[in-house]
Amino acid sequence: MESSYVTLYLIRHGRQSSRLCNVDVELSPAGFRQAALVGERLAKERVQMVYSSALIRAEQTARAANLYWNVEHIIEPDLREIDFGRMEGLDDEAIRQRFGDLKREQQKMETDIPYPDGEGAGDVMGRVMPVLRRIARGTKERVAVVTHGGVIRCAAAHILGMEPAKYRLLGRDLENCSITELRFDRGEERFTLERFNDYGHLEKEPDLLRGRWIRGEEEGAR
């Protein structure tokens, strides 16, 4: 008998091999290790299918984790990261110099200000939530979804009924390969947020945590 509940495990992709904004690049060695750890952790949950965005870092994360699940992997382009527009391909310093004023306005969280020639949080919610609902209405009961930090924060904010501009209140820096768990009630057609940015599987390897990467302390960071 088909369950009336579906669990979606939203997984942020592993660490990528570039520090530039939203470039479509491969995982770093640390990223592959993170993907293996999240795959191993979720193996006991008996994941039945995995979806990922089409960006290389998400595809590779899904494939590496799927070595522990051996299930069908489907590419879903609408799970891609938020479009940062003219910020894409820039480093942090260039973004601060060119778009500092805009980012300060965004941080006020008074209005959903889109990135220059890119998307706002409402745009992301509008394209991602229909995909998550479609997945949840399918025949599987436990599905992994490998996507991106902005997507996960926007989806969680939407489920919690937050205004789009407020999504920045949820996890300033999600850990790579962290787990955010959603439960979908098929009868009520409603998502609930069960856990957010769970990275317990990474804590035994501190070099894999995001703080080390941001500070440039891990091997090969520069």
Image (tube, rainbow, N blue to C red):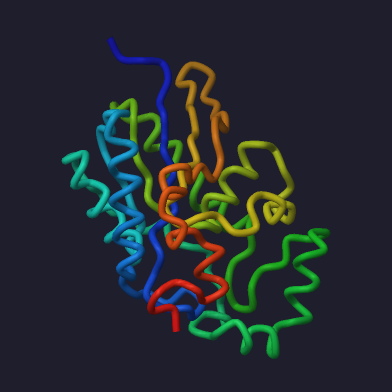
Image location of residue 43, percent across then percent down: 27, 35
Q: Nearer the viewer, residue 61 or 98?
A: 61
* Farthest residue, direction top: 1
Q: Residue at x 73, y 61 (%)?
A: 112
Quadrant (top left/top right/bottom left/bottom right) for the C terminus: bottom left
Q: Nearer the viewer, residue 95 or 4?
A: 95
Q: Is residue 123 above or below residue 50?
A: below
Q: Is residue 197 above or below residue 43?
A: below
Q: Nearer the viewer, residue 139 or 89?
A: 89
Q: Residue at x 53, y 50 (%)?
A: 152
Q: Is residue 87 above or below residue 157?
A: below
Q: Residue at x 48, y 35 (%)?
A: 181
Report the side of 31 relative to 120 (left or right).
Answer: left
Q: Is residue 30 above or below residue 69?
A: below
Image location of residue 209, percent across then percent down: 49, 58
Image location of residue 26, percent across then percent down: 31, 72
Q: Nearer the viewer, residue 162 or 91?
A: 91
Q: Residue at x 56, y 64 (%)?
A: 211
Report the side of 59 relative to 17 (left or right).
Answer: left
Quadrant (top left/top right/bottom left/bottom right) for the N terminus: top left
